[in-house]
Image (tube, rainbow, N blue to C red):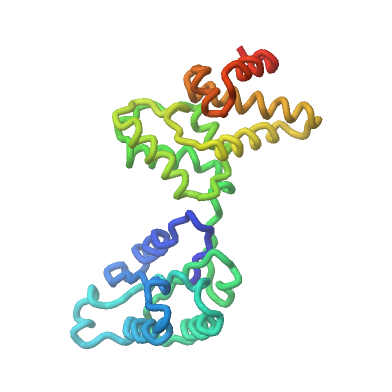
Amino acid sequence: MAIVAENGIDKKEIAKLLHDNSRTPEKKFIHLNLLSFDKDYLEGHFFITFKELLSFPSEEGLLNPKNMVGTIFLQGIELIEETFRQTLIQYIKDKRSLVRVIISTTDSKFSRGFETLTIPPLRERKEDISAMVVGYLNKYAPNVKYISPKAIEILSYYDYPGNYDELEGIISSSAVIFPMAEVFNLKSLQLNLPAFDNIVENKVFSQGSMELLKVRREYEKSLIELTLEKSNGDKHEAARFLDFPYSIFLERLKALGIS
C-alpha cells in the first residue's frame, strides 16, 4: 500500500491509524526511514533489516502476537537512487509475507502498482478547518472558551503551503504566546507577512473578477484592515508590521476611506 500526500501531512500518523484499525492491531508497528541508514551501505544494510522484519516469526513469536510485526511504514523511497528504488518496489510487490508494508511518498508516480491512499492537502479541505482548530485548541490551549468567527474566516482564506502541520503550528504558537487566554481571535494568530499576503489575495479574488485598479485598491485596503484588526486598532503597530512610515500609513488610511 502507498500513502500519497504533500509535505506537511503526517503520513506516519495515518499509517499508524491504518495499523490500529487493522485485523492485527496488537502486532508491532515499525517505522523505517531509508535516510536513516548509512548512505554508503544503504542497500545492503536496509535489506538485511527489511528481510528480517518480513521473515516468518519463530515458534516463540507465534505464541505472543506482540512479538510479531504487523505493519512496516517505509519512508524516504522517493529520495533514494533510482536502481535501488526499482529493486525495492519490486521486492515489496513480490514479497511472500503477511506483514503489511506501507510506503510514504509525495509523488504518485512511485505508488503505481500499489493500492493507494491519497490524502488531499488542506487547501482542498477548507471546510475542515473549524473542526481542526477546535481539536488543536483542545490539545494546546484548553483554557480557550470562545473562538472568534472572524479568526476562522481569516484562516479559511489561507492556502497552507505547510498543510495540516502548518495549521497546527499556528495554533500551538498562539498557545505559547497567550498561554492562559480564554479567547482565540485575530490577535491570537501568529501569521507572517507572506501569509497575510496570501490571505488577502484569496479574499479579494473570492469576490470575482474586477478591474485592475479596483483589484489593487481592494487588495491594499483588505491588507490594511486585516492588519488593523489583528493589532486591535493600534495604527503604530499596524504601520510597523507593514513596514510603512507612520505618516504615510495615515495618508493611505485616508485615501482608502479606512476610519
**Outermost residue toward the right?**
211
How far across and how far down the image is residue 14, in percent? 42, 60
How far across and how far down the image is residue 216, in percent? 73, 29
How far across and how far down the image is residue 3, in percent? 49, 65
Q: In this view, does 161 lie above or below 118?
A: above
Q: Residue at x 56, y 73 (%)?
A: 110
Q: Is residue 218 above or below residue 49?
A: above
- Would you say 89 lies left or right of 29 here? right
How far across and how far down the image is residue 73, in percent? 40, 70
Q: Is residue 107 above or below residue 234?
A: below
Q: Which corner quadrant of the image does residue 221 belong to?
A: top right
Q: Residue at x 39, y 87 (%)?
A: 44
Q: Which corner quadrant of the image does residue 11 belong to?
A: bottom left
User: Toward the viewer: 246 or 17?
Assistant: 246
- Would you say 137 lies left or right of 210 here? left
Q: Residue at x 44, y 40 (%)?
A: 170
